[in-house]
Amino acid sequence: MNQEVIIEQIKEKRSFLCVGLDIDLDKIPRHLLSETDPVFSFCKAIIDSTSSYAIAYKPNIAFFEYYGSKGWKSLEKVSNYLSTNYPNIFTIADAKRTDIGNTASRYAKAFFENLSFDSITLSPYMGKDSVEPFLKFKNKHAILLALTSNEGAEDFQFSESSETCLYEKVIQVSKTWKNSERIMYVVGANRLNYLKKIRKITPDSFLLIPGVGAQGGSLREVAFSGMNDQCGLIVNSSRQILYSNQGLGFDISAKNEAKKLQKIMEEELIKKGII
């Protein structure tokens, strides 16, 4: 998927919402556990109920891998369902994979060819030759961890060399790599003090922003600090939408939560003159 399709979806749905699919069988409605594939059944219901407001879906791969071969089969079904029924919605494999070139190529083929994802999250620590294999795929995107929301981000990401923090160097150096126009960046919603600076370093790139909702990030502040002239933001919400109701009618509750976020996004897009 090229960025023009993402921008069209943002304008059409007046939204830049990504729904994270972090599926926990201990939290989904109990009546779904009798289904042949409760993970897929839950995902399908969430996708169908929120697709009017979501421009992206982000399956968290660990939540599928945890269930072994059954979980991987569920992931295949979710990916196929999205690509078949919602081809204009951006899909993100939240896998955080990277490795040496030959291995990276296999990861890229697994997620881009076999599973048909539009993008994948990657750790940039191993550098250019671990990321460029993902950038060889036309209309596919690598989403690099730049400045994450977790406490441990303090361990390395703010380390300075010549007054440049590591997260800044990740962005600056990655822009020199082949097909770097296909790179996006992860920035935590709680990093508002740095979001404006990051937007100056990479004015045209899409930023994937986790941490809004259950993790307490402010959607309006993220929009104020991170938007560019075409929006340039994909803001993720997982638990707030997925588990707003853990019984019958969970899909309607998910739809209502997605709509609440979309309404705020619509207001911010209007303020910016994007719609």
Image (cartoon, helix red, strand yellow):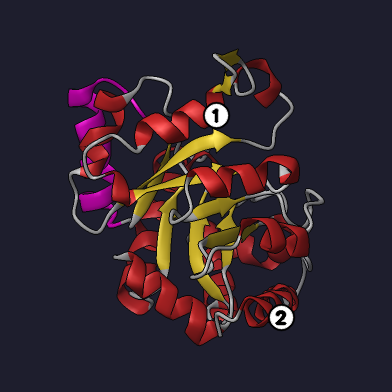
Q: Which residues are magenta?
A: 97-116
Is 102 left, or right, of 7 in this rendering?
Answer: left
Q: Is residue 213 left or right of residue 231?
A: right
Amino acid bearing label 1:
Tyr
- Looking at the image, is mark 2 or mark 1 earlier in the sequence? 1
**Residue 127 vertical position relative to residue 67 in the rendered view, above or below:** above
Q: Residue 104 magenta-drawn?
A: yes
Q: Residues within 10 Å of mark 2 (few under 14, many from 20)?
A: some
Answer whether labels 2 and 1 touch (C-beta < 8 Å).
Answer: no
Q: Secondary structure at mark 1?
A: helix
Residue indicated by mark 2: 267
Instruction: Identify residue for label 1.
Output: 167
Q: Position of residue 126 (x, y in %)?
A: 37, 19
Towards the viewer: 187 or 67: 187
Report x, y in % for residue 133.
21, 35
The location of residue 141, given as percent across then percent down, is: 33, 51
Label drawn at residue 115: none
Given the image, on which type of amino acid does mark 2 rest?
Answer: Glu
Is residue 190 visible from the viewing direction of this image?
no
